[in-house]
């Protein structure tokens, strides 16, 4: 059977991504095809996805130190995709359910089914919106132009999920309407009450300066202007330190909340 051009290109990209090697990526072992169905084969992650440990396992919550470590793990994996390989890999579907936890509860970024490869310096060109609502950067939702910066936005949403213990979209009980996490946290920041956004279930496990810095980092990653978001290199530099509160002041002070 002669495969159509789109399928050929997809399979070529998947084959290329099979060469990605990093301790914070779920290793893709191969793929198989049956009819029109393509299935990707990854290493098994025994502790499942991060979102389950934040939202679905109230008796087995990950503590703050574990959460911060997982965020740093994912940041390093994403930094490799953006800056550490011979091509830029734009993941396009970063979300907490695509962060898998290994036997040591270390975070690994998985599910490359929507990823696209670009040469460094190349301007992505696509007309198809893909990803998950609540994690999509504004420019992707309107212009269908995924870039490394739009991945950074999605990572910022994950940062806020982990720090706040809230889903990207959830119903506000008192108003019976859907509340958007990024808008809720940004409003707390504008009002000078940012620490009120922290997950109450882990209160007392963190230094206030550290939590505030992580929340600001999440907001910076979700800046409406993609040119003002940090790169994943900058994010890694913040999260892998012994104390995240010593984050580069120029990055955090550059955060301009939306009004």
Image (spheres, grey):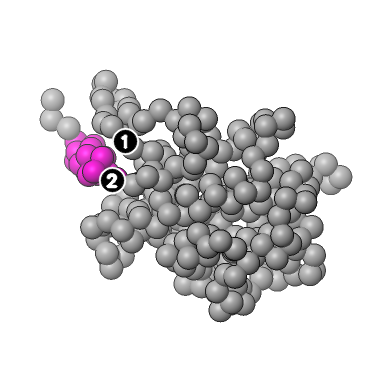
Residue 94 image point, x, y percent: 48, 47
Q: Tell whether label 1 touches label 2 (CB within 8 Å).
A: yes
Residue shown at 52% from the left, 30% from the top: 47
Residue shown at 28% from the left, 46% from the top: 20
Compared across the picture, whether 217 is left or right of 79 comes to: right
Residue shown at 24% from the left, 60% from the top: 119
Which stretch did the figure color magenta?
A: 4-21
In which quarter of the view is residue 257 placed? bottom right
Mark 2: secondary structure = loop
| Residue 97 shows in the view | no
Compared across the picture, whether 109 is left or right of 20 comes to: right
Q: Is residue 195 magenta?
A: no
* Front residue (pair 86, 202): 202
In which quarter of the view is residue 167 placed? top right
* Front residue (pair 86, 72): 72
Check disc 1 and report the residue beneath it.
28
Q: Residue furthest right?
A: 174
Residue 64 image point, x, y percent: 66, 48
Q: Quadrant of the N terminus?
A: top left
Residue 152 image point, x, y percent: 48, 59
Looking at the image, is mark 2 or mark 1 earlier in the sequence? 2
Q: Quadrant of the C terminus?
A: bottom right
Mark 1: secondary structure = strand
Check disc 2 and report the residue beneath it.
20
Residue shown at 32% from the left, 29% from the top: 41
Q: Residue furthest front?
A: 242
| Residue 250 shows in the view | yes
């Amino acid at each position: 059977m002669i495969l159509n051009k789109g399928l050929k290109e997809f399979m070529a990209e998947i084959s290329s991504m099979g060469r990605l090697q990093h301790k914070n990526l779920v290793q893709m072992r191969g793929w198989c095809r049956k009819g029109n169905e393509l299935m990707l084969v990854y290493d098994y992650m025994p502790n499942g996805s991060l979102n389950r440990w934040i939202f679905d396992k109230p008796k087995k919550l990950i503590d703050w130190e574990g959460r911060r470590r997982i965020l740093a793990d994912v940041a390093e994996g994403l930094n490799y995709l953006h800056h550490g390989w011979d091509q830029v890999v734009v993941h396009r579907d970063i979300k907490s359910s695509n962060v898998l936890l290994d036997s040591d509860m270390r975070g690994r970024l998985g599910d490359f089914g929507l990823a696209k490869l670009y040469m460094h310096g190349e301007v992505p060109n696509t007309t198809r919106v893909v990803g998950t609502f609540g994690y999509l950067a504004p420019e992707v939702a309107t212009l269908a132009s995924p870039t490394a910066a739009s991945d950074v936005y999605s990572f910022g949403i994950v940062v806020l999920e982990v720090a706040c213990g809230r889903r990207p979209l959830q119903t506000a009980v008192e108003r019976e309407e859907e509340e958007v996490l990024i808008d809720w946290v940004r409003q707390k920041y504008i009002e000078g009450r940012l620490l009120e956004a922290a997950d109450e279930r882990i209160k007392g496990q963190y230094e206030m300066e550290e939590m505030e810095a992580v929340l600001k980092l999440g907001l910076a990653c979700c800046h409406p202007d993609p040119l003002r978001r940090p790169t994943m290199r900058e994010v890694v530099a913040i999260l892998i330190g012994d104390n995240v509160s010593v984050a580069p002041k120029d990055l955090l002070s550059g955060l301009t909340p939306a009004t």
